[in-house]
Image (cartoon, helix red, strand yellow):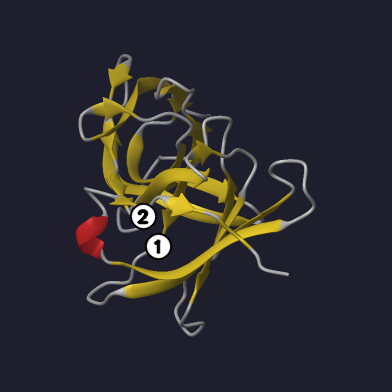
Amino acid sequence: MNLVTVTVSGETLYSGNALGEVSIEFDVNESVELNTAESGSTTTDVNGSYDIDLQPGLYNVTLTKSITQGSEETVAYEGFDTLVLTKGQGASTKDFTLEKKTVTVSGKVSYDGNNIENVTVNFLPVNFTLDINSATVLSDEEGSYSVELMPVSGEDVEYNLTAIITNITGNDYNYYWTEIISISEDDIQTGVAKNIILERKQD
């Protein structure tokens, strides 16, 4: 017969602020004999809140927030913790903190002084032997874009940045931008600002 479950609720946080749409895995801690815990999982809402019923026991908790960029999915935030629930315990509150794993690269896309929307911006690792993903985003109606790129511990990582669009002003021309950018773990907290100024491709 199962034990009475404990309702656990709380928030997922990054730098003290709520972080929504985080996946939480509650796994049985196998190092404990006769552990009565039973694995469970949930996802926080857009405000970072969660609510789950769990069996008493000791849990290892894994938290991840992934971001889809084009056809690639990148783990942007990650966290690990433990949770202890005792028999007969009432409802419990537990907040979890995550760490950022990626570098935010953001800026404006413009041409001839005007911000341009719907520009495809690609980031492709220069060194294909590194275990990192490429990423693709579109600039929004204000010309802004934002992408999460994966650094590598202890070294700088180069990405080939390319941006291209056809027919900005009614003329059937290609407009483009290309350069190599470099990121590192030191950029995780600050991010990297990179504006893209399109040039008209010569015929």
Q: How many marks?
A: 2
Can residue 58 be seen here?
yes
**Residue occupying the point 32% across, 71% down:** 152
Q: Quadrant of the C terminus?
A: bottom right
Q: Residue at x 37, y 47 (%)?
A: 77
Residue 161 visible in this rendered orientation of the protein:
no
Residue sitting farthest toward the top:
90
- Determine whether, in the image, residue 113 is placed left or right of residue 174: left
Q: Front-most of 73 and 142?
A: 142
Using the image, determine if residue 139 lies above or below residue 29.
above
Q: Would you call the spot at circle 1 few (<14 residues within 10 Å), some (14-19), or many (20 or more)?
A: many
Check residue 102 in the rendering and tell me which mark sits there, or answer none.
2
Please tell me how crowded label 2 is: few (under 14), some (14-19), or many (20+) other residues with Cα within 10 Å.
many
Where is 161 relative to 6, above or below? below
Label located before the other in sequence (1 or 2): 2
Quarter of the image where one finds residue 54: top left
Query: Residue 103 location, x and y as percent?
Result: 34, 54
Question: What residue appears at the point 51 percent right and 32 percent down from the top-left corner?
Answer: 42
Q: Tag 1: residue type?
A: Met
Camera-nearest residue between 124 and 181: 181
Residue 150: numbered disc = 1
Residue at image position (52%, 37%) is 115
Q: Is residue 49 above or below residue 39?
A: above
Residue 55 lies left or right of residue 101; in this view the side is right
The reply to whether callout 1 and callout 2 are in contact (CB within 8 Å) is: yes
Q: Secondary structure at mark 1?
A: loop
Give the CA separation, mark 1 to mark 2: 5 Å
Instruction: Choose top left, top right, bottom left or bottom right for residue 156.
Output: bottom left
The picture places residue 150, in percent across and down from the top left corner, at 40, 62
